[in-house]
Image (cartoon, rainbow, N blue to C red):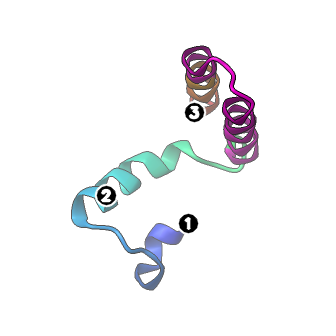
Amino acid sequence: NNLHEPQMVYLDSEEADFGIRFSPFINERNVEKLNDEFSIAYRQIEQNGNAKIIFLDLCLKVTVLLLK
């Protein structure tokens, strides 16, 4: 967790507070799958997919992964 390495973190106080509160939800069980889902959504947007549908799908998948 880089949040505990101040020399590696360049955030203002509001961003740092968010990072501290959000970091418990990103862990070894979901980080790779989250990265995969964002990559898939990025690729679909590049291929001119329907952005509303892609982002809805991404949000639903990310919500499930964050609850793991």
Residue 21: image location, x then y, percent: 37, 48
Q: Type of residue at label 1?
A: Asn
- The residue at which mark 3 appears reads as 66
Looking at marks 1 and 3 on the same chain, the residue that comes earlier in the sequence is marked by 1
Instruction: Determine whether, in the image, residue 17 is placed left or right of residue 46.
Output: left
Q: Residue at horizontal 70%, vertical 45%?
A: 35
Mark 3 residue element: helix
Q: Type of residue at label 2?
A: Glu
Looking at marks 2 and 1 on the same chain, the residue that comes earlier in the sequence is marked by 1
Quadrant in which the C terminus is drawn: top right
- The residue at which mark 1 appears reads as 1
State the CA–CA distance, disc 1 to disc 3.
17 Å
Q: Residue at horizontal 43%, vertical 74%?
A: 9
Q: Which mark is residue 56?
A: none
State the CA–CA distance, disc 3 to disc 2.
19 Å
Highlighted magenta segment, given as a residue range:
31-57
Crowdedness near tag 1: few (<14), some (14–19) or many (≥20) residues, C-alpha within 10 Å: few
- 39 relative to 44, above or below: below
Residue 62: image location, x then y, percent: 60, 29
Which mark lies nearer to you, 2 or 1?
2
Q: Are marks 3 and 2 in contact (CB under 8 Å)?
A: no
